[in-house]
Amino acid sequence: MIDQQTLKAKFDYRPDGCLVLINDAETDVWKRRPVGFMSCSKDRPEKIYRATKIKGRQYAIHKLIWLWHHGEYPEQIDHINRDGLDNRIENLRLATASQNMMNRKRFKNNSSGVTGVSWHKKSERWFVYINANKKRKNIGYFDDLELAELVAQEARHKYHKNYANFC
């Protein structure tokens, strides 16, 4: 595991969210190039982020940037704007796995266009639900999609607080 001192000796952080290699050679060509390559999450292949290898071990760039600034290598980091390639320090925050999931993008197979709202065929109404504390909470049924969306947003704000995703 790399520590903050070693990381700062090898890399500089740029305000655009990139780590750049510190090169002691006469030319500083490498200093302008961000390190890393595109990688994807093992459990979620659609989740793309930047990674790099240091001494044969792969590290996520966003976690290295957190280490560079705060001195700890985190278990989980949430990208506030949900862009896994935006590694500016102000876009990163510590999160549990559950909190990270709260800020997840809407599923591709979502038919209502609203997170936490689906059409209930039997009742022929919009059904609002939320996942919180590893449990699914049924919020209610609504005739109007706009009202269901508003109720879903209020539920996300209540249960997910700062990690609520409103997109």
Image (tube, rainbow, N blue to C red):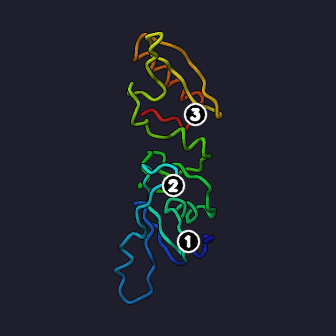
Q: Nearer the viewer, mark 3 or mark 2?
A: 2
Q: Nearer the viewer, mark 1 or mark 2?
A: 2
| SS label for mark 2 | loop
Q: Earlier in the sequence, mark 1 or mark 3?
A: 1
Q: Is residue 5 above or below residue 39?
A: below
Q: Earlier in the sequence, mark 1 or mark 2?
A: 2
Q: CA distance from mark 1 to mark 3?
A: 35 Å
| SS label for mark 3 | helix
Q: Which residue is mark 2?
A: 42
Which numbered circle lies on residue 161?
A: 3
Residue at the (45%, 51%) spot, across then down: 45
Mark 3 Cα-neighbour bin, 10 Å: few <14, some 14–19, many ≥20: few
- Which quadrant: the N terminus? bottom right
Q: Amino acid at mark 3?
A: Lys
Q: Do callouts 3 and 2 mark residues in contact (Cβ within 8 Å)?
A: no
Mark 1 Cα-neighbour bin, 10 Å: few <14, some 14–19, many ≥20: few
Residue at the (41%, 55%) spot, across then down: 85
Q: Residue lying farthest front?
A: 122
Residue 32 lies left or right of residue 64; in this view the side is: left
Q: Do callouts 1 and 3 mark residues in contact (Cβ within 8 Å)?
A: no
Residue at the (54%, 64%) spot, across then down: 64
Q: Amino acid at mark 1?
A: Arg
- Which quadrant: the C terminus? top left
Residue 113 locus on image (x, y percent):
38, 28
Q: Tell me where residue 156 sits by quadrant.
A: top right
| SS label for mark 1 | strand
Q: Amino acid at mark 2?
A: Lys
Residue 126 locus on image (x, y percent):
45, 16
Residue 114 locus on image (x, y percent):
42, 27
Q: Which residue is mark 1?
A: 57
